[in-house]
Image: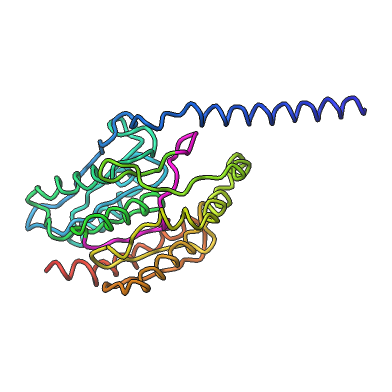
Amino acid sequence: MLRIIKWGLLAILALLLLLVAYGWWVVASFDTGTLPERHGRVDATLFARDGEPQPLIVGLGGGEGGNAWTRNVWKQQRERFLDQGYALLALGYFGTPTTPEHLDRISVDAVHAAIIDATKDPRVDGQCIAVIGGSKGAELALLLASAYPDIDAVVAIVPGNAVFPSLTDAMITPGFSLHGEPLPFVPMPWRATPKLLTGDLRAVFEAMMEDEDAMDRAAIPVERINGPVMFVSATKDEMWPSREMADAMMRRLAAHGFAHVHEHLVVNGGHREPLDEFPRMEDFLRQHFSRRCR
């Protein structure tokens, strides 16, 4: 029995050493100098009714990749926005055949350029642009609006308040880049690796957020947004601490004397429960965005 226990412990130790060696190899071999294939390309689909130019809502999916707002699961909400007098631009920024494979140094500039290109359509009012994004898409929406003043409103669903690592095996590059340069980001500490391997993503992000200096450097400058902002977070978010990060952004806006309407809707539940609150988001857009376009 002792011999079996001994060999079992040796096998576990060997496995751990292999995992450590593999992790080191993944990080050491990752090319941080070359931008990903298809960098700067996006997947854009415009939904719009005929008639007078309509305010534009830009829909950004999250870490699942692909062009989320083109999928059937979002058809009902797309139609609701169209019925309310908006045009909707569905934007995929990674994970499609024409975009980068991974969420790695995604070009915020390229996403913005795709939005501006859509405003050339005569059905779109290019003077009225709102962005709605969920999870990593909320991170992108806030980055867009903080960098480009022609974004007039943001709805950020279960958002992050900083730039975090890319969704690659190595996780040693930022998820986003701006003006051709990778953005400062919060690194993932090695001690969070066991939590990552077991799928406890919230614990991974909590470990990253303990690095206060990195959080300060990578913080999204939401105070630069040129319009109303709505955060929608979850009390029991299993993916990352969206409530805490939205609270931090509300404090940042207050500290900078943010001149526009900013609200934080806290939803009781997990990462997906806020998706049941689209009527509240529609009300926010109607009151603080589309009325400004008339």
Quadrant showing the N terminus: top right
Q: Residue 155 lies in magenta, yes or no?
A: yes
Q: Position of residue 142 (x, y in %)?
A: 32, 56
The residue closer to the viewer here, 283 or 164, is 164
On screen, residue 23 versus residue 266, left or right, reads right
Q: Residue at x 54, y 60 (%)?
A: 236
Q: Position of residue 248 (x, y in %)?
A: 44, 66
Q: Residue 170 lies in magenta, yes or no?
A: yes
Q: Position of residue 39 (x, y in %)?
A: 29, 34
- Stretch in magenta: 152-172
Q: Position of residue 212 (x, y in %)?
A: 50, 58
Work out whether 11 lies above or below 149.
above
On screen, residue 242 versus residue 141, left or right, reads right
The residue closer to the viewer here, 28 or 16, is 28
Picture colour scheme: rainbow
On screen, residue 11 versus residue 100, left or right, reads right
The residue closer to the viewer here, 222 or 73, is 222
Work out whether 120 lies above or below 170.
below
Quadrant showing the C terminus: bottom left
Q: Most extreme residue toward the right, as rendered?
A: 1
On screen, residue 199 versus residue 36, left or right, reads right
Task: Name the chief secondary structure element in magenta.
Answer: loop
**Total number of numbered labels?**
0
Q: Residue at x 55, y 52 (%)?
A: 202
